[in-house]
Amino acid sequence: MTGQTTATAPPQLYGRRSRLHAVEALSDRLASGGAVLAVTGEPGLGRTTLLHHAARTFTAGPVLHVRTDPTAPGRPYADLRALRRSAGAPGKGAPKEDVTADTAAGDLLDALRATAAHAPLLVCVDDVHLWDPASRTALACAARRLHTAGRVGLLLSTRGPLARDFAGLPVLRLHPLSTADADALLDEATGGEVPPELRADLLEEAAGNPALLLALLRRLSPAELSGERVPARPLADAAALTGVVGRCPGGTAWADADDLLLTVAAALREPDAGDVDAGLVQRALNGPALGRDPFPEALALTDGRFRFHSGLVRRAVHAGAAPDRRRAAHRALARAHEAAGHRLLALLHRAWAATGCEPLLAEELSAAAATASASARLRSVAHARAAELTPQATLRADRRTDAAEQALLAGNSRHALRLLPEPPGEATPPAVRGRAELVRGIAERYDGPVTDAHASLLSAARLLAGTAPARSAAATLAAADAAWAAGRMTECHEALTQDDTDAGRAPHGPARDYRLGMRAVLEGRFDAAEPHLRRVVGHALTGDRPDTLLRSVAAALLLGDPASAVRAGTRALAAARNRGSGALEPRALEYLAYAELRAGWHAQARTHAEEGLRAAERAGQRNTAAHHHAVLALAASIEGEPDVVTGHVSAALATARRHGLAQAATLAHWAAARADLGRGRPLDAADRLGPLVRPGPRRGHFAVWMLAVPCYVEAAVLAGRPQEARPIVADLEVWAGLGADPHAPAQLLRCRALLAGPEDADELYLRALDLHEHTAGDFERARTELLYGKWLRRRRRLREARDRLGAALVGFERCGAGVWARQARGELRANGAAPSGEGPGALARLTPQQWRIARCVADGATNREVARSLSVSTRTIDYHLRNVYAALGVRSRVELARIVEQAEKSGARL
């Protein structure tokens, strides 16, 4: 063990803001007494860095930063002696080996009390799990009695869960970094120059562990980091994993890891396995596995099942074991699974134990994977291992394609692409090449340039036409979907019209109706499209295939029936979940959230889009994630959160630009412009929307840009440029006449009112409001009420204006449109009436957290000071403060302070 009073400057801590606040709070408590905090987490998550930060930033007094030397021989109390020497008590009272832990703890507290006599003392003790047991027990006793030592703070760290000795102490658990934080760390370490595919692989292998991520980077050559050369696989090999974990559990060499540890680690190599039956492990070991003393600290046994406390340690145990011992463990598990009747798992473990080509075993494994009732992930792993054992090239390619198909179903499109065979030659049968191209195209549609997906899917359709006509038709329809996402109407139409002869012979069904209906829509023959699309929507009442139900959502939206679209989307989501499809669930949530947005149900759309974004990120579907970001940006543009809008818009556009997602890009630009409009910046909104809605090469997606026209007309008129908006109203009239958007007729009248003279505008606004009565959703009606109220106020019709503006305020508040509600309140103030939400009485509507923040701000605290006092982030304070302003109808801290002061004087809220 070594003691030091200074710490080297640690790297930036990503994703640890709340943890830093907790450590800083411990330091603050030392002004009046003692405090203790235990930091736990698996190796590599930053426990040592966090202690370094605490030692570096503590300025109230001396710092004792103690680290354990894992190579030093351990005798009872050896570690405690070292701590006492670091505390300035080198010999007197040093604990003997035969004293009790309580006596040793008392001696330690005496030494710490003396060191902290003149100023607070912070003691940072790293890697306590490496201490000798006697020292660890004594330290735990001292920690519980630390309040008797005066102003002493004890910050200790330990790997994995807190040992029994320290039970009951305050714990700060470190978790893996989020994808965003790991991505930021990767950029910091590399300057952001890592190619996208390698970046995704590094983040996946590191699994949020910052030390492992940095270790993987250090092992890559400049050519590999730049993408000029493909790095060896796996990225996280035995050397990288064991280097981060450190000592092997039990203190042995990694190659000689405990048999129990290795057997459990080998069993947990199975996909979807978070734990393993202890009886199975016991049978594999052919001896007693339970009740051991001492029990391996890396394992937990709960309800008869083993698991590792740390996934990283599990990976290190398996990868670091000697190859012959690893294969022996898999053979033992194969026998245990065979005896239990788990044929697929038994064959998989046999395959993992095999070396070289094993064609008979590969045949058995592939057949079992094709017929077993198992998860898509398990079937994918089995097919992939069967391919590795297959010597014949064509059969190996076929099995790799089987593995890729299952990986795609499991929701891992990047892994599916990696599994696909190398581009086959002409000698490979068209059916094998066609299946591979179909998987490639669908994976690229989820997570790649959609133009590439379109080309791959058309290629698949041609290759499969002779041997698998149903798959060929599915590939053609998927190619049309890819062209739709890219905003390429001509290519979409061509895909829908390919091979009309075969389409005519195809049986009637939702896929054929969807194809014919969509083709008619693109040709402008809406009367011809309607019966086909109606049948597709009707199928949602009885269908249970997620992909078909998603087409029902699209058809309902084209028919201007968002309520039916929401119902179909709900069924599609349930169907995807029932099938356990990690690929289809994010898309079902995407369609459902967009349908809810079109129906005016913004809060529900936001909830489903947030859930869908998480699912898409787990599945590696960046294109689907971009659409979720766009929907979230649109929802936030209504709720009035400019920072949130900006974040989602940036995320959506980053992927949309790289992958050619015209639909997601148009939605994102529309969200940004609507946020500008809500914040009273019509000129910015008009500049942003103009290129999207006016004719020309920069016009937005052909199915989306028309939805943004009402915002553009409003922005152009309010910006003093009505002449720019007049030509586009004719397009909106055509759109409203098609019936594809239930809000469009009322929006058309609102736009005409904005552009009309005083003699016509009044009637147009009233007619628009009449039409709003027949559509769901408060937001669009409230916008019309707001514009009408502004128009009335400018003409000094103040009583009528008050009624309209009040109705607008109620509508905006009902749908949570905070920024728009502030506009309505501002207009009411200008009209001479105080909004009902303003004044001391409105404070009763604040949540307790909002009230605490309002009082702190009224007392003159900055946002950063409020955040520190409440142990939250400044971003959280910003968010709550915006809601406080909206609820009270104020625009500044001065106004807020006035209302709070009046409330406290009157006792309105104390």
Image: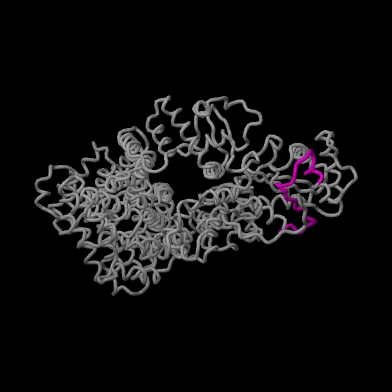
Q: Is residue 764 visible?
A: no
Q: Residue furthest right?
A: 92
Residue 792 lies, in percent from the top left, at: 36, 64
**Does residue 3 belong to the magenta stretch?**
no
| Residue depicted at 37% across the width and 63% down the height | 658
Look at the image and name its color scheme.
Answer: one colour
Residue 165 lies, in percent from the top left, at: 71, 35
Looking at the rendered structure, the number of numbered marks drawn on it comes to 0
For the residue pair 741 and 300, the one nearer the viewer reads as: 300
For the residue pair 491 and 225, the one nearer the viewer reads as: 225
Residue 444 lies, in percent from the top left, at: 32, 55
Residue 783: image quadrant is bottom left
For the residue pair 452 and 220, the one nearer the viewer reads as: 220
Residue 542: image quadrant is top left
Whether residue 903 sits left or right of residue 418 in the image: it is right
Residue 576 lies, in percent from the top left, at: 33, 40
From the viewer's perspective, is residue 758 above or below residue 883? below
Q: Is residue 430 visible?
A: yes
**Does residue 72 belong to the magenta stretch?**
yes
Magenta span covers which residues? 56-81
| Residue depicted at 26% across the width and 43% down the height | 549
